[in-house]
Amino acid sequence: MAPANQKLAALRALWDEKRQGRTMPLRRDINVFVLRPWLGNLALIDLTQEGEGRVRLCGISLFSRFGGDVTGRDLTDLREDIGSSLRELVRNVQATNAPAEGRYSCTIEGQRLTFEELLLPMAGQEDHDNMLLFACYQTKVESAW
């Protein structure tokens, strides 16, 4: 298993442990201290009443995935080529209340980058998602030429 996949698998195992048999863990069950190994590769996404998302926090290692810091931005405001795969993952998680995995590729400065992604729902006071934990690791760099 590739290192990125190991990190995502470990995060998913932590999420699974923290949910304690529930559909998903409560936000308060996963604190910043237990997330330390993944911090730069995480984003927190608040879900809005309209079913859309707003990035509450974007880790610095995700800047290459998003083309910069997207903290405070709505997912619908992201460029189509950057945001469409993430919005699809969000819709999948909202429909199933279960984790979703994805892959995103882009070309930056002549290099083809590939990212492995994991989106995990977290519940507020009730057992439905109102925040998502997004983890992403770059897994491949190739020359685009």
Image (tube, grey):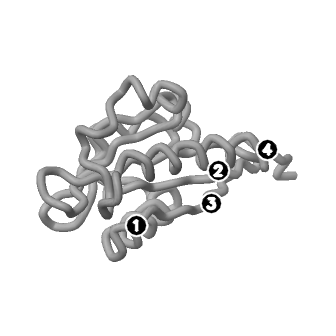
Check disc 2: other Cα within 10 Å, few if <14, some if 14-19, many if 20+: many
**95 or 106: nearer the eye?**
95
| Label disc, if present, on residue 103 of the rendered structure | 3
Q: Nearer the viewer, mark 3 or mark 1?
A: 1
Residues at marks 3 and 2 touching, judged by CB atoms closer than 8 Å: yes
| Horizontal and vertical percent position of residue 124 | 17, 51
Q: Amino acid at mark 2?
A: Phe
Identify which amino acid the numbered label 4 is placed on. Answer: Val
Residue at 36% x, 27% y: name it.
Answer: 32
Please give left or right for residue 55 compared with residue 7 in the image.
left
Name the residue beneath numbered marker 4: 141
Among the two numbered marks 3 and 1 on one chain, the one whose residue lies closer to the N terminus:
1
Residue 26, percent across and down?
Answer: 24, 48
Q: Earlier in the sequence, mark 3 or mark 2?
A: 3
Residue in view at x 48 percent, y 64 percent: 100
Residue found at x 73% / y 46%: 139
Tell me the residue that label 1 is attached to: 98
Q: CA distance from mark 3 to mark 2?
A: 6 Å
Label 1 crowd (10 A; few <14 / some 14-19 / many >=20): some
Residue in the image at 52% along x and 32% along y? 38
Please tell me which of labels 4 and 1 falls first in the chain.
1
The answer to whether residue 110 is above or below residue 69 is below
Q: Residues within 10 Å of mark 4 (few under 14, many from 20)?
A: some
Labels 3 and 1 touching (C-beta < 8 A): no
Marks 2 and 1 in Cβ contact (< 8 Å) = no
